[in-house]
Image: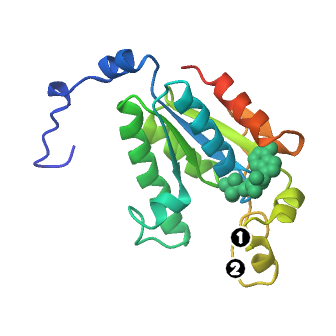
Amino acid sequence: MAENIYPIEDQLVQRSEREAANGHRGAVVWLTGLSGSGKSTIAAAAERKLFERGVFARVLDGDNVRDGLNGNLGFSLEDRCENTRRVAEVAKLFAQTGAVVLCSFVSPTRAMRQTVADIVGPDDFLEVFVNTPLEICEQRDVKGLYAKARAGEIKNFTGIDSPYEAPENPFLELRTANLTVEEAANQLIEALPL
Ligand code: ADP
């Protein structure tokens, strides 16, 4: 514990009290996969469905943290690790507040995802592998990034000139090539141990 820091956790409303009031547990649902695999789309659809069922759910994704909390970070390996660490700390606070946090981040390495699991704790970390073949992600090319990466305008792009390490034992795998967004979101929320 850092010097001169005195946590007051024991004086605060406890997580168990919050979860009892919400009627479900908190958790960090970590969606990992290639750019364009469908992480953000599935997270948004799942958030809406959970909200409609009265679940306290919240999406965290690259775009909503990169311009605020992590606005000073770039895409070097060091900055990507720091980006992941901060997101994990925020997700942990949300989960401890009883929320189901749907995090969509490429998070290409096992080490990065292990960092998240270590920060949020193994009981709260639910790894979801959004498994979509590179060819399909590249066809979709939602943000035009694959075209830029192929043209050499973006370096170290995951799947093109930087590796993606698939999860070995994810909590859930969604193969979106054979699913609609609706089906993928339903599979996700039905699997959640809330
Ligand atoms: P990511 O967040 O992984 O970069 P996005 O969610 O931004 O990916 O983009 C995925 C694209 O693929 C969206 O345009 C979405 O509509 C489309 N798509 C087609 N089928 C699916 C599916 N089954 N699940 C998720 N997205 C799908």
- The answer to whether 138 is drawn above or below residue 52 in the figure is below
Q: Quadrant of residue 155?
A: bottom right
Residue at left offset 45%, top offset 70%: 73
The answer to whether the residue bearing label 1 lies less than 8 angstroms from the nearest atom of ligand 1 is: no
Q: Residue furthest left?
A: 4
> Where in the figure is residue 174, as x and y percent of width and height?
77, 37
Q: Secondary structure at mark 2?
A: loop
Q: Which residue shows up at 44% across the image and 42% down it?
A: 91
In this rendering, does residue 170 appear at all?
A: yes
Q: As shown in the figure, which amino acid type bears the numbered disc 2?
A: Ile
Q: Are marks 1 and 2 in contact (CB under 8 Å)?
A: yes
Picture quadrant where residue 11 is located: top left
Q: Nearer the viewer, residue 63 or 78?
A: 63
Q: CA distance from mark 1 to mark 2?
A: 6 Å
Residue 187 image-quadrant placement: top right
Q: Position of residue 116 (x, y in %)?
A: 50, 44
Is residue 132 rendered to the left or right of residue 29? Answer: right
Which is more toward the observer, 193 or 180?
180
Q: Residues within 10 Å of mark 2 (few under 14, many from 20)?
A: some
Q: Which residue is mark 1?
A: 157
Identify residue type, mark 1. Answer: Phe
Which residue is painted at 82% across and 59% down in the image?
Answer: 137
Q: Residue at x 50, y 46 (%)?
A: 115
Nearest to the observer: residue 2 or residue 129: 129
Quarter holding the N terminus?
top left
Reading the image, the residue beneath label 2 is: 154
**Residue 64 x, y percent position in the rendering:** 49, 59
- Badge 1 marks a residue whose secondary structure is loop
Side of 84 relative to 11 (left or right): right
Query: The C terminus is located in which quarter?
Result: top right
Foreground of the two, 186 or 175: 186
